[in-house]
Image (spheres, rainbow, N blue to C red):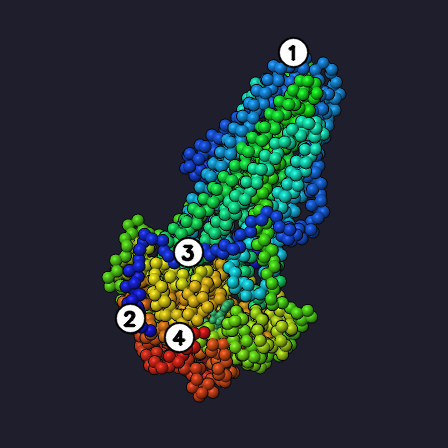
């Protein structure tokens, strides 16, 4: 350490402090742009994947499409009925009362059918969309339970949550509207057909305005797509930043970053505002165009159709029907235009959803994997294990050791030496690159993960508790554990007393991640949870690091009985923690450098004895050379 | 089991987000408030509403023009001589129609654009307000409210409020205009037919108000159930290692299914309510149209009105068809805005528990003496449980205070009180004689730094994480701080060095690396008081002792508080406090405490004396 380290830090801080500038090194939210760049409106593969979720509801799809068709048909028929009524029921002079009555009866029938069809279609579609939505979410959630932890390590919870919610919701919107679009398209063709049938020339004339619309769209589309995508992206950027602010609020407040973060967030929110305004412009610019074309078509009908009526070449009823149809004609066009952005959003979301569903499951049960029986001996063996999170950078190198049944073995070593990683391998959180890990004499890759998990209980370095009662947390997945078992485990780890002092005792509700408990208390509860799991092998990764030695000693005493006949693997930095261990394995830089019991290792005078001495000796007395020696291990892992 | 889990999760829901389905009163005041917010953009609102009125008026003239054109063809049928005149009359009608259509399109565009613009501006303001509020709300709030619920408010509820103007308000204006002017025109043309044409309006009005209330209640309940689902998913993903470690996937799926199913049921119900409403409205509309046809037809036959007039009536009704269908959506939008608004405003209106006093002054630090004066404290969430009782101590610049004690004894609580994450409930904490409650929060938090026990790392580069508290820092200073925390060499060994992105809560770092990063991050600040809350527990003794050596320089001109379980971490403190049950039960230097032979001594013995005999001995005694 340079002698003047601290002083220098302060001088520089004053030099660079400059409230006016945007901080160069600050960001809020973490956003990977590449994911959002999916702008296609239609992608066969994605549609196929989504269809797989809709398939189970085929019958309902058919019903609702049928209902849509009927609905559309009634929409088409109503103007025809009106036309009939005008031409036959009320032609001046020739009074034909029954025709009017017939048409009113037909009209009544049409609206009844219309009502029923729209009711069926909307209910069926709406509920089906909800079902599909929940199914997709369930499939993703289920898949995430299986994907390898290396994927989960890299991916923030917030990002996955936005897949499970935001993207799933835009799929729902798409599903709901797409059945309606079917109706729209049918309506469009139906109207074209009916108009041509009523009067071919007038029909053609009316349709002649359509090419203008297509030309306009050719120019509009690419720009609009870009604008919609930009809006979508800035929105998820801003949401990501908000999620970060929520999760990291304690860190933000303790480092007084609110002001800086607010400025940065303002930038993102303002960018979001801007892109949304642009997108709104693009979406709305089509409105006057469509309206003008409607007006143009109607003008044609009035001028041309009107003069045909004047010349007696056309019934006035047909002209009225035309005017009706033209107004109805542009409605589906308008909603299909809106549908465009929904489609595009849905495709982008569908892409992200299928990406999650397609995450490879690296660690999975072999076909015919064996079930690890609870009567296995409980031995653990590492044989020449090489492992790295990135295969190019091994974290464990040729590690071999054996833990005999019923033995308690301690793993010690500098931080980052690979202790937690080794324990993760016992549980097959990851697969080794070389060598093998044996539990109960079986390669973990030959066992079902479920049975392996039931025989290896872990207290993780970071205690994680769920929202819910203390009781539920300790019992966790062992639904058959009794209250007495839970209390016994809590007593063993010395948690009983403080639990009883909580408001509600074992039924006290824990906050998010157990936030209303102290860290040590959380650790005790997660310890108790591992005891209740009643597994043959118990892995304690710094299980008592945040607990004082006295409490720890009480736990160790209680454990002696509970651990009888079980294998223990203990990681600890406080070497007093491991004094009960049968054997000690010292890891450094991913390699086993020493093994033996306490006395043997102390006699050897290696890393262990140095670490041990450091534990209680005054650090003033440690010779610089010794510090240097351990420096190589400490920070270069 | 699972039903309990969901049950208690529901019970645990925060009371503030749970808005009573109080019916009209509460809903209306929320809607009024959103409306007032909208009015703060007077120009855009004027444009939007003005265009809506003009567009609606133009739209209403279309049936008139069409009717006129139809009549023009009718009158001419009798006499051929008038043919040419009729044709030019038709041409005029056609041109008028075209002009009106174009104008209507333009005004509709303006209406929609400005309506959306108002919404987006409000969305922007609310986003900022939400972000700022969440950042400022004190720890006790965040202890109580689940982060998933805040995310729901900040994203989904905000959307509901943002959409209010365009999907609810503007539509009301549009519908009122269409129906109002239409009613006037129709009734003045033919009172009977006019009343018939509008006969659906009262029914629709009644349905909407009934449905709005029903939908609001369903919305509220659905949001709650979705929150539970969110929580289940979020905790599962956040605690995925625990899930895997216990092979509890099946259990988690069960939890998920239960939450999911209860939300799905309600979602179905909501679809039902909505559809029943829309269909009934559409039906009543068509019914009115049928009546017009029947009665109007008879009138035409009787020669009371022309075919053109009937066509006007019918065209008018087709114009209304779309808005009537939209009425359902409008009702939904009102219901949504009022529920979402209640939740959002519930958050924005919250009082911040820990904030600057009205007469707060920036801290003026000269000596840098920290004093605890008979401090008592209970967490706001559990007020009858005193966590600290009459804690008093003093530390001067350059001094180190060590704190030890069993889990839950209140050590972290002491650390949390100094930067005012919570306010003391009794006694006072002073810095250089100034009560910290009288100082501005910003100045206080710049003078007090806490290395938290369970630290949150941001998903960004190591460099940005270290510079979090001082984003203007130069690279050299970042490297210094990281050397200080014994992290520098490790970082240099990484392929991307300081540019390596670390994950949320630092998953891709080992426990000790994460703690060292947290220490480095705190070293960047320039505090007068620095607290290490058990922040070397996952660091081996050798590395820790190097950190401590480095610390000695740093500690010279500030107060250092070290909370630790490993006694070698704090044995050199000027003063060691042994805390138990929220009280200081022993205090003194290492030597004094050893000599005293109390609890501290017992801990010391446990840590330094090797071997089994300790267990036996303690077992006999305790
Ligand atoms: N999920 C992960 N992804 C990538 N790298 C990781 C991951 N977890 C750990 N590492 C890296 O692997 C190395 C070994 O980490 P490990 O957690 O096994 O150390 P450890 O011995 O348990 O240290 P500590 O005592 O600090 O907990 C470290 O350099 C760490 O940065
Ligand atoms: N946010 C909170 N809301 C309510 N009670 C809390 C909260 N945080 C802590 N407590 C309670 O206050 C007491 C003191 O907790 P504190 O975190 O100060 O303990 P600690 O001494 O730091 O323990 P450890 O050594 O385990 O970290 C404990 O009983 C704990 O359950
Ligand atoms: Mg570890
Ligand atoms: Mg603590």
Counting from the top left corner in percent of width and height, residue B168 is at 52, 36
Q: Nearer the viewer, residue A227 or A153?
A: A227
- At x 67% / y 11%, what residue is drawn? B79
Secondary structure under the numbered disc 4 in the rendered image: helix
Q: Nearer the viewer, residue A253 or A335?
A: A335
- Quadrant into which the C terminus of chain A falls: bottom left
- Mark toward the viewer: 2 or 4: 2
- Write down the residue under mark 1: B81
- Write down the residue under mark 3: A27
Counting from the top left corner in percent of width and height, residue A490 is at 52, 69
- Write down the residue under mark 2: A4
Crowding at dot 4, Cα within 10 Å, few <14 / some 14-19 / many 20+, comes out as many
- Where B51 sits versus A352, above or below? above
Q: Are marks 4 and 3 on the same chain?
A: no
Label 4 marks which chain's residue? B
- Mark toward the viewer: 1 or 2: 1
Cα gap from disc 3 to disc 2, whole angstroms: 31 Å
Counting from the top left corner in percent of width and height, residue A536 is at 59, 75
Q: Is residue B444 left or right of residue A498?
A: left
- Mark toward the viewer: 1 or 3: 1
**Residue A407 is drawn in which quadrant?**
bottom right
- At x 50% / y 83%, what residue is drawn? A595
Cα gap from disc 4 to disc 3, whole angstroms: 31 Å
- Where B251 sits versus A374, above or below? above
Secondary structure under the numbered disc 3 in the rendered image: loop
Crowding at dot 2, Cα within 10 Å, few <14 / some 14-19 / many 20+, comes out as few
């Amino acid at each position: 350490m340079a002698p003047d380290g601290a002083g220098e830090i302060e001088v520089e801080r004053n030099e660079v402090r400059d409230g006016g500038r945007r901080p160069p090194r600050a960001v809020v939210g973490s956003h990977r742009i590449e994911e959002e760049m999916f702008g296609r409106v239609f992608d066969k593969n994605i549609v196929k994947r989504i269809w797989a979720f809709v398939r189970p509801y085929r019958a309902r799809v058919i019903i609702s499409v049928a209902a849509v068709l009927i609905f559309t048909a009634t929409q088409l028929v109503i103007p025809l009925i009106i036309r009939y009524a005008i031409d036959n029921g009320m032609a001046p002079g020739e009074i034909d009362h029954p025709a009017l009555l017939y048409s009113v009866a037909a009209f009544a029938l049409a609206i009844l059918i219309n009502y029923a069809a729209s009711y069926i279609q909307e209910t069926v579609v709406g509920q089906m969309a909800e079902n599909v939505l929940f199914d997709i979410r369930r499939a993703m959630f289920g898949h995430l339970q299986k994907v390898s932890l290396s994927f989960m390590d890299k991916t923030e919870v917030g990002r996955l949550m936005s897949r499970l919610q935001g993207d799933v919701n835009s799929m729902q919107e798409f599903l709901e509207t797409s059945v309606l679009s079917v109706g729209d398209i049918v309506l469009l063709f139906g109207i074209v057909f009916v108009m041509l049938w009523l009067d071919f020339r007038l029909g053609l004339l009316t349709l002649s305005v359509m090419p203008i619309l297509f030309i306009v769209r050719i120019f509009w589309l690419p720009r609009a797509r870009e604008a919609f995508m930009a809006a979508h992206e800035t929105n998820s950027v801003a949401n990501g930043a908000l999620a970060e602010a929520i999760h990291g609020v304690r860190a933000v407040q303790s480092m007084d970053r609110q002001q800086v973060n607010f400025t940065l967030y303002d930038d993102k929110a303002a960018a979001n505002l801007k892109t949304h305004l642009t997108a709104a412009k693009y979406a709305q610019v089509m409105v006057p165009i469509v309206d003008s074309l409607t007006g143009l078509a109607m003008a044609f009908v009035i001028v041309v159709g009107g003069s045909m009526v004047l010349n007696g070449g056309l019934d006035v009823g047909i002209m009225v029907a035309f005017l009706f149809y033209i107004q109805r004609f542009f409605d589906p066009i308008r909603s299909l235009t809106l549908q465009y952005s929904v489609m595009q959003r849905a495709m982008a979301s569908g892409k992200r959803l299928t990406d999650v569903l397609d995450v490879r499951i690296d660690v999975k049960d072999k076909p015919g994997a064996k079930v690890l029986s609870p009567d296995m001996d409980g031995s653990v063996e590492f044989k020449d294990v090489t492992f790295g999170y990135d295969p190019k950078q091994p974290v464990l190198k040729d590690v071999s050791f054996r833990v005999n049944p019923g033995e308690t073995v301690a793993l010690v070593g500098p931080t980052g030496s690979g202790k937690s990683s080794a324990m993760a391998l016992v549980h097959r959180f990851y697969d080794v690159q070389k060598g093998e890990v044996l539990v109960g004499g079986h390669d973990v890759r030959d066992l079902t993960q479920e049975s392996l998990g039931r025989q290896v209980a872990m207290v993780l370095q970071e205690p994680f508790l769920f929202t819910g009662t203390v009781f539920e947390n300790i019992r966790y997945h062992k639904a058959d554990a009794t209250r007495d078992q839970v209390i016994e485990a809590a007593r063993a780890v010395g948690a009983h007393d403080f639990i009883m002092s909580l408001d509600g005792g074992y039924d006290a509700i824990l906050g998010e991640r157990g936030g209303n408990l102290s860290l040590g208390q959380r650790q005790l509860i997660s310890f108790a949870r591992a005891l209740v799991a009643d597994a043959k092998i118990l892995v304690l990764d710094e299980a008592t690091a945040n607990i004082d030695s006295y409490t720890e000693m009480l736990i160790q005493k209680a454990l002696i009985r509970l651990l009888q006949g079980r294998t223990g693997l203990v990681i600890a930095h406080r070497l007093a923690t491991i004094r009960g261990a049968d054997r000690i394995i010292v890891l450094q830089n991913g390699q086993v450098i020493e093994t033996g019991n306490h006395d043997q290792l102390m006699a050897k005078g290696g890393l262990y004895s140095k670490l041990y001495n450091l534990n209680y000796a005054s650090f003033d007395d440690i010779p610089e050379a010794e510090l240097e020696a351990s420096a190589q291990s400490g920070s270069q892992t | 089991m699972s039903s309990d889990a969901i049950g208690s999760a529901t019970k645990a829901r925060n009371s503030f987000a749970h808005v009573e389905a109080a019916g009209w009163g509460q809903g209306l005041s929320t809607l009024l408030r959103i409306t007032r917010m909208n009015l703060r953009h007077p120009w855009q609102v004027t444009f939007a509403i003005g265009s809506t009125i003009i567009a609606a008026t133009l739209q209403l003239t279309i049936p008139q023009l069409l009717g006129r054109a139809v009549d023009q063809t009718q009158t001419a049928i009798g006499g051929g001589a008038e043919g040419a005149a009729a044709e030019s009359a038709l041409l005029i009608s056609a041109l008028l129609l075209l002009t009106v259509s174009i104008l209507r399109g333009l005004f509709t565009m303006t209406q929609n654009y400005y309506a959306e613009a108002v919404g987006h501006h409000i969305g922007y303001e609310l986003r900022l307000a939400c972000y700022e509020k969440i950042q400022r709300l004190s720890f006790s709030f965040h202890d109580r409210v689940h982060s998933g619920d805040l995310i729901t408010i900040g994203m989904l509820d905000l959307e509901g409020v943002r959409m209010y103007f365009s999907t609810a308000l503007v539509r009301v204006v549009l519908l009122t205009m269409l129906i109002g002017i239409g009613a006037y025109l129709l009734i003045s043309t033919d009172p009977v037919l006019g009343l018939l044409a509008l006969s659906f309006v009262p029914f629709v009005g009644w349905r909407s108000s009934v449905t709005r209330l029903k939908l609001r209640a369903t919305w509220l309940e659905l949001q709650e159930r979705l929150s539970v689902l969110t929580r289940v998913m979020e905790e599962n993903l956040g605690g995925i290692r625990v899930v895997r470690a216990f092979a509890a996937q099946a259990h988690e799926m069960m939890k998920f299914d239960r939450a999911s199913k209860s939300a799905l049921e309600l979602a179905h119900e909501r679809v039902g309510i909505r559809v029943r409403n829309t269909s009934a409205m559409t039906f009543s509309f068509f019914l009115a149209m049928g009546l017009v046809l029947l009665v109007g037809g008879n009138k035409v036959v009787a020669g009371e009105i022309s075919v053109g007039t009937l066509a006007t009536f019918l065209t008018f009704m087709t114009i209304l068809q779309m808005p009537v269908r939209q009425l359902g959506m409008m009702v939904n939008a009102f219901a949504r805005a009022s529920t979402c608004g209640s939740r959002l405003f519930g958050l924005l209106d919250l009082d911040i528990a820990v904030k600057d006093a009205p007469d707060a002054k920036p801290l003026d630090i000269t000596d840098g003496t920290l004093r605890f004066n008979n401090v008592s404290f209970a967490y706001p969430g559990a007020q009858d449980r005193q966590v600290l009782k009459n804690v008093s101590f003093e530390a001067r610049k350059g001094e180190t205070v060590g704190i030890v004690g069993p889990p839950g004894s209140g050590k972290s609580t002491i650390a949390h009180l100094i930067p005012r994450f919570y306010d003391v409930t009794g006694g006072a904490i002073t810095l250089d004689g100034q009560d910290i409650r009288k100082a501005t929060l910003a100045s206080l938090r710049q003078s007090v730094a806490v290395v938290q026990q369970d630290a949150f790392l941001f998903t960004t580069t190591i460099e940005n994480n270290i510079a979090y508290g001082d984003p203007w820092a130069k690279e050299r200073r970042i490297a210094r701080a990281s050397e200080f925390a014994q992290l520098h060499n490790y970082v240099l060994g990484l392929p991307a060095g300081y540019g390596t992105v670390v994950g949320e809560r630092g998953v891709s770092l080992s426990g000790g690396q994460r703690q060292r990063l947290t220490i480095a991050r705190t070293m960047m600040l320039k505090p007068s008081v620095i607290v290490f809350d058990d922040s070397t527990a996952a660091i081996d003794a050798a590395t820790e002792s190097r950190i401590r050596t480095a610390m000695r320089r740093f500690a010279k001109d500030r107060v250092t508080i070290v909370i630790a379980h490993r006694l070698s971490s704090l044995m050199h403190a000027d003063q060691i406090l042994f805390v138990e049950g929220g009280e200081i039960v022993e205090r003194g230097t290492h030597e004094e405490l050893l000599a005293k032979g109390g609890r501290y001594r017992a801990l010391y013995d446990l840590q330094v004396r090797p071997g089994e005999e300790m267990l036996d001995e303690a077992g006999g005694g305790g």
